[in-house]
Amino acid sequence: MIIRSSTALVRPGMLDEFRAFIEAGVTAFATLDGFLGDEIVVGPDTLTYVSRWRDAAALVGFAGPGWRTEPVVLEDEDRFLVAPLRVRHVELRQAVPDDAPGIADVWHAAWGDGHHGLVPPELEAVRTRESFGPRAASRVPHTTVAVADGGVVGFVAVDDDEVEQVFVSATHRGSGLATHLLSDGEDRVATAGQAEAWLAVVEGNARARRFYERQGWSDAGPLDYQAETEAGPVPVPVRRYVKRLAGNGVGR
C-alpha cells in the first residue's frame, strides 16, 4: 500500500470553505482502480488530503507518470492556495532482511524519545544503538515497514496476539503514519485468527496512551512487562491495552 499526502497552505479565512470544496471534489476518486480510502487532516492553516492506494500502478492511473512529485489539482483549487501543493508518499510493505538496519535506527531513536526517564535505569543503560540491530533483524518476518525516499521511517512488529512495537521517525510524527501502522498490526493479529490484540505502554508515556485510546484501545490495567536484554529480562511497570478485533465473530 502507498499512502499519498497532499498538503495545502490555505489562504487566511478560507479553511472551512476549502475543506468543503475538497470533500465535494474527491468523491469520484472512490471509483478509481486501486483506491483504498482517504481522509482529510486539518491544521491551523493547512489541509492535508491523505489517500491510500494499492500500488504504484494505481497511482499512475490517478496522477499520471509523474505521480511521485506532481500534485493532482482540482479545477479552481488554486484560489484557495498560498503556495503549490506539497506531495509526499509513504509505502507500507512487508519487511525484508535489508530493512533491519533502518528499523533499528528508527527503533533506537523513537524508543529513547518515548522511554527516557520512564523505565528502570538498568534497561535504559543497555538500550544502545547496537542492541537494536539483532532485535530488529529477528523481527523482520513479523514486521511491516513504512518506507519514504528509500529509507525506513516507521514500522510495526507483531508477536502472536501482541502488537509488540509501533514506532515512527521524528520526521513523520503527526502525519497519521502511526495510525496506519497500528491498523496494519491489528490486521496481522486478526489474520492470525486472534479475537483480541494487546500491547504494553509505559505508565508515564501519556502521549502514547492518548494515541492508543483515540484508536479504540482500552486500558486493561497494570502489568510487569518483561523487557528482554542480553543479561536477562528486566521488569518494567506498564499498562496493558487491549482491543477487540473485527472477524472471528467479534466486532471492532
Image (cartoon, rainbow, N blue to C red):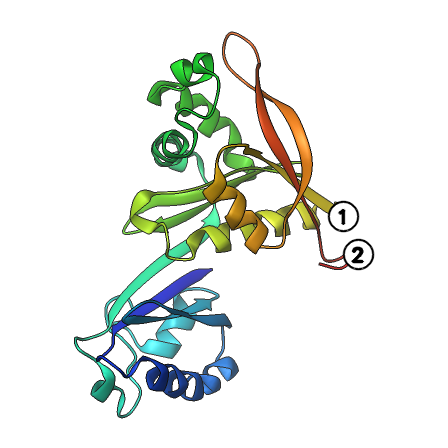
Q: Residue at x 54, y 18 (%)?
A: 228
33 relative to 107, above or below: below
Which quadrant holds residue 40? bottom left
Separation (CA) of disc 1 from disc 2: 7 Å
Spot the residue most to the right.
249
Q: Residues within 10 Å of mark 1 (few under 14, many from 20)?
A: some
Q: Is residue 193 visible?
A: no
Q: Label 1 belongs to which residue?
A: 195
Query: Which quarter of the figure is the C terminus placed in?
Result: bottom right
Residue 128 percent coordinates (x, y)? 36, 19
Q: Residues within 10 Å of mark 2 (few under 14, many from 20)?
A: few
Residue 118 percent coordinates (x, y)? 46, 26
| Tag of residue 138 | none
Amino acid type indicated by mark 1? Ala
Q: Are marks 1 and 2 in contact (CB under 8 Å)?
A: yes
232 relative to 15, above or below: above
Sequence-earlier tag: 1 or 2: 1
Taking the image as shown, residue 4 lies to the left or right of residue 236, namely left
Given residues 232 and 31, the one toward you in this image is 232
Taking the image as shown, residue 104 lies to the left or right of residue 38, namely left
Q: Residue at x 62, y 49 (%)?
A: 186
| Tag of residue 250 | 2
